[in-house]
Amino acid sequence: MAIEATNREKELIEQFLKETTLFLGPEPSLMQNHKLESITQREIDAIRKVSDPSVISVARSKMQAGANEAFEMLEQIGAAPGAKWGDLVCGIFTASGDLSIVSSGGVLIFSGCTQYGVKYIVENWLNDPEVGVAPGDIFYYNDARYGGVHNTDQNLILPVFENGELIAWIVTVVHEGENGAIEPGGMPSAAEQVYDQGLAISPIRVGRNYKFYKDLVTYFQNSVREPKLMVVDMKAKLYAALRIQQRIQETIQEYGVDAVISVLRKTLEDTVEEVQRRLTQWPDGKVRMMGIADSTLRENLLIKVNLELTKKGSELTLDFRGSSPEFANRPNNSVTSAMKGMLAQLFLSFVWPDLPRNQAVLAPMKFIIDDHSIYNASFDVPNAQSMMTFFPAFTVTQAALAKFLYNSPEKTTNLIAPWYNMIRTIIYGGITQHGEVVGNLCADLNGMPGGARDGLDGEHSIAPIFAPMAEQGEQELIEEEVPIIQLSRQILKDNQGFGKYRGGQGYQMIVTQKDSDYFGFMTTTIGSKYPSTYGIFGGYACPTYPLAKIKGINVFEILKENPKKMVYTFEELMNNRPFENATYSTHHGGLQFELAQEGELYVITQGAGGGYGDVLDRDPELVIKDVEENLISEETANRVYKVFFNPETLALDIEKTETARKEERENRIKRGVPYNEFIKSWTTDAPPEYLPFYGSWKEKDTIYAGSPTNIMKEGSLSAVWLPNPRDVRIQELEEELAALRISNK
């Protein structure tokens, strides 16, 4: 006979379970919740006491200035390339852990993700008798599963107290790069498990009384390839946070602590109210959009990004069901917090850039995402290259939003085609010319081209989608520290998102290394087979771009002995092959780390922003201007834009151009077929057998996992295992060898 436990026994059991928790991992309910915490009575009282708009405005401005000051300070004293060139951010959070104020420059997504790490501390350590939170405590973490993009981003968290009361949190974040992963530079595309991703710090206290614990810092230093960088940037982040704390204290001295609490909460509440007001202006309806990530960075395949955007009243629903399942042993999975943080960046940089930069922009929005999908990945699958899936989600959402924004009576910025979304640069590692071990990335990834705008062409290689005020770095300074030599960096001709207004164009780089006996490169980008960035309203997507390698030479010897052999464009190098005895090859953009001998060449091509509108509507004079500036060829002007001119004088042939455009419009009508007929000839019931396709095909509740026979149902996805490409190649070679043995018998 069962004996019912007494209330006292139940209390003892609950107390025992609470005190003997085996493992405090990422809390799913916390990590899924992008909403604001409920307003506290303390915040209500503060808002009642301090509601004068002039006081709120000045107090907010003082704290905003403190965040901006800390950003600039961290740029100046930080050691990592990410610190020097703006891949960082500084922010102020409420006592509950909601992000309220962010530096004007920097990577908003970092702070947009860090709320989860702060709330983890609030939930688990704030009232814990063994840990606790006190003035002067320093917390730190980099494990993206607790709120972040990938483990290379390191977060310092500082609580702010006033007379014993916790009133706020300060966070300073830097993309550090090196973190001891299986490949140097912090973003290992070769990672097959979370344990390949290097140092994984859950939110922990790393110091007290504003001083770091030496034993923990030493442990961190012993876990990475660049111990000097680790300690220098920990200190840099601390002192930047202290500067923000100083500005908060000055605000308290002038306006009182209630003003600070009121500002932090009211900024969030006002943002929610304004977002809802603006959403109400959009027409109700649905927009569907899809995208493709064409690689895991280790093999070519098609990873579907599926979005249904629904706007009703003051709520926007982003439904990503039907996207690819997660990959068990590839790092291109994204935790939900990272993907949401990236979309917050989209709204605050490209849709409503006039709004305060804080997490409340997403509060009126609803997300529907499958468990175990690439956008809601399990905590036990790697995520070091989550950008390869949530960057495409950014682009798909940006294109879908254009349909609503076009019909919005109120706009706060130009309607814009998708921005180029890939980090085309070199990640490096090895021993420098100074004998130091390094591993990091080049900051020229920050030069992403802009999308075409309504009425304006896109800007060339201007800024990344994640940091509007980041810099590309000074090559001369880089060459002083590491043995990377850029032999050429120039805008690539015909690399354009064509349209009535064209997207900004990207550059090509020719990179090598000099004066090191042990140094290598890797690259991490998609878009070599299928465009990663799309146009809108008839505009073209960007082209596709392989990585090129020229091995077995020393270009410095060639430049010394026969400099006329050297050419400086992708086309000339790969089409003319000027160097005898060299090995020429092309590769998709996901190159795992490999050693490079001195003088061997790696050629990287950056993409282009999406085009806006019909190419036949482009002003012919703008086409000729692009020809004159060597942005496009005469062939492109003729074939794509149907613009003709005298190649010697560039004088427009008006009659020939008008005739060609009229003929093309007539040919379009002839080529066109009714929609129902087109669908019959275009669609199939399932992806073809030869196509490694991941995601929904026709109905979003049916998910394909690499072949038409491997089907999952929405709501019951599971991780996909992929073979090691090296093992696949070994098997192919063994089969070839076996066939040769048989034929020789």
Image (tube, rainbow, N blue to C red):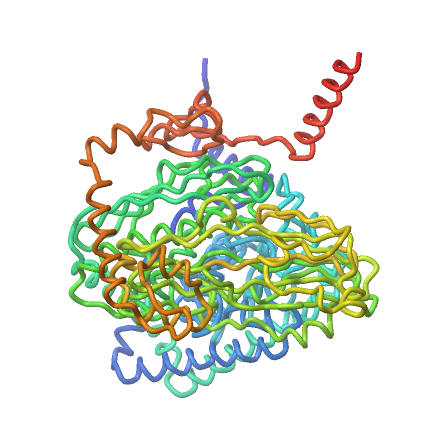
Where is residue 730 shown, x and y percent of the image?
71, 29
Where is residue 649 shown, x and y percent of the image?
39, 75
For the point 40% across and 49% down, the residue is 393
Within the image, what quadrant is residue 108 found in? bottom left
**Left or right of 208 in this view: 505:** left
- Up/down of 743 relative to 80, above or below: above
Where is residue 660 shown, x and y percent of the image?
26, 57
- Up/down of 474 relative to 605, above or below: below
For the point 35% across and 57% down, the residue is 36
Q: Quadrant of the C terminus?
A: top right
Residue 41 shows up from this direction: no
Q: Nearer the viewer, residue 585 or 480?
A: 585
Q: Nearer the viewer, residue 547 or 336?
A: 547
Residue 200 shows up from this direction: yes
Within the image, what quadrant is residue 346 found in? bottom left
Give the mark count.
Answer: 0
**Left or right of 642 in this view: 530:** right
